[in-house]
Structures are given as C-alpha cells and as structure tokens.
Amino acid sequence: MNKKLLVAALLAVAGTSATAQAQANKESGFYAEFGLAQAYYTEPAANFNNMLGVVKAGYSINKHVAAEVMAAGALSSANFYVGSTYIDAKVSSAYGVYGKFSLPIEDKFSLFVRLGVTSATVTASNSYGSAWASGSDYSYGAGAQFNFTKDIYGQVDYMSYYNKNTVAVRAPSISIGYKF
C-alpha cells in the first residue's frame, strides 16, 4: 500500500514538473506573428515583386509540431512595361493553413519546415482597365527561429506559395512573434 502511494506521488510530481517545464519554455500553446514578405511572381509574360504584410496565428502542440493559419496583404505594387504598355501589378492577398515541423538545435534556436495550402490573388491594371486572378496550391518552405525570451521570438523563412501552370509565387520573409 505504501509503495503504491509512493509511486502515485512520484508520478504526480513528475507529471507536474514536466507540465511546468513545458509551460516555462512555452513549448505548447498559442502564438501570433507579424512580419514582412517580399513576394516574387513569375510567369512567361511577366515577372515582378512586391511587399506583403503577413499575420500568422498558430498553436504549438509540442516543441516539434504546430498548426498555423496565415493572412497577407499587399503593402506595395510593382510597376513595369510589357511592350509599350505600363502595368501596375501586385500579389494583393494570400491566405493559408499549414503544419509547421521544428527541430530545436538549442534552447534559443530551431530550424523548421512548413507544409500546407495557400490561396492567393494577383491583380494588374493599366490605362485600359484591370484584371485579377486567384488560385490555390500546395505550399512549402523552410526557416529558422530565434527565441529572444521565453515569449518573444524572431523568424526568417522562404516559402513557395504557388507553383502551377508556369506561374509561381515565392517569398522570403522576416517576422517577430509572441507566445501566449
């Protein structure tokens, strides 16, 4: 009877200690990120790039796996000529859902890959009118995260958001995040 009570007490202390350690390191829980991405749009008829503001929200299941959503909007547009026609174009918006898989290298630094689906809209206009196109595709990327404190971190990544029918949208980004 005393052995069972001792084992139960040790298991309770170990479980509480593991939970407290995970909470202290913020290995699980919600997070939010705010950042900038430089979108590169390529197709046979035109290539351009523009700046996007990016917001991500996610939930870390543990220190290796997280699920997140992303929304991005254009902060700038690109201006260029196709022949003699002046065009203003941009990746105007993007939305996505991803799985994020991390490999901690040390307490403050980790590498990660992100896999998911993104939907994006591209708009273009000239003196004759305007047009837009939207599409969705599988997306993937990789990056690195540096934890400044237990709550605040910085991140850099490179993503391929869309790559279909000779059209591609890729973007490096930098962001700052907060773990709740």
Image (cartoon, helix red, strand yellow):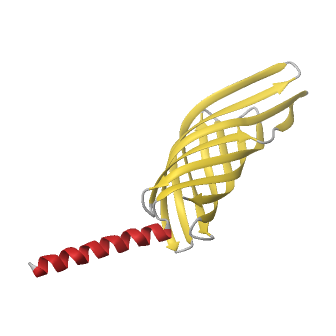
Name the image quarter holding the C terminus. Answer: bottom right
Q: Would you say 133 lies left or right of 13 here?
A: right
Residue 77 place in picture, x, y as percent: 81, 38
Q: How many marks?
A: 0
Residue 177 place in picture, x, y as percent: 62, 58
Q: Would you say 118 lies left or right of 83 here?
A: left
The residue sitting at 54% across, 68% down in the picture is: 110
- Point out the residue furthest to the right here: 84
**Viewer-proximal residue among 66 and 22:** 22
Residue 127 place in picture, x, y as percent: 89, 21
- Point out the residue furthest to the top here: 128
The residue sitting at 81% across, 41% down in the picture is: 76
| Observer able to see residue 83 | no
Q: Would you say 102 lies left or right of 13 here?
A: right
**Viewer-proximal residue among 149 and 37:** 149
| Observer able to see residue 161 | yes
Q: Is residue 96 above or below residue 85?
A: below
Quadrant position of residue 90: top right
The residue sitting at 62% across, 65% down in the picture is: 152
The residue sitting at 49% across, 62% down in the picture is: 102
Q: Is residue 34 above or below residue 162?
A: below
Quadrant position of residue 135: top right
- Point out the residue furthest to the left here: 1
Residue 172 place in picture, x, y as percent: 68, 53
Name the image quarter holding the N terminus. Answer: bottom left
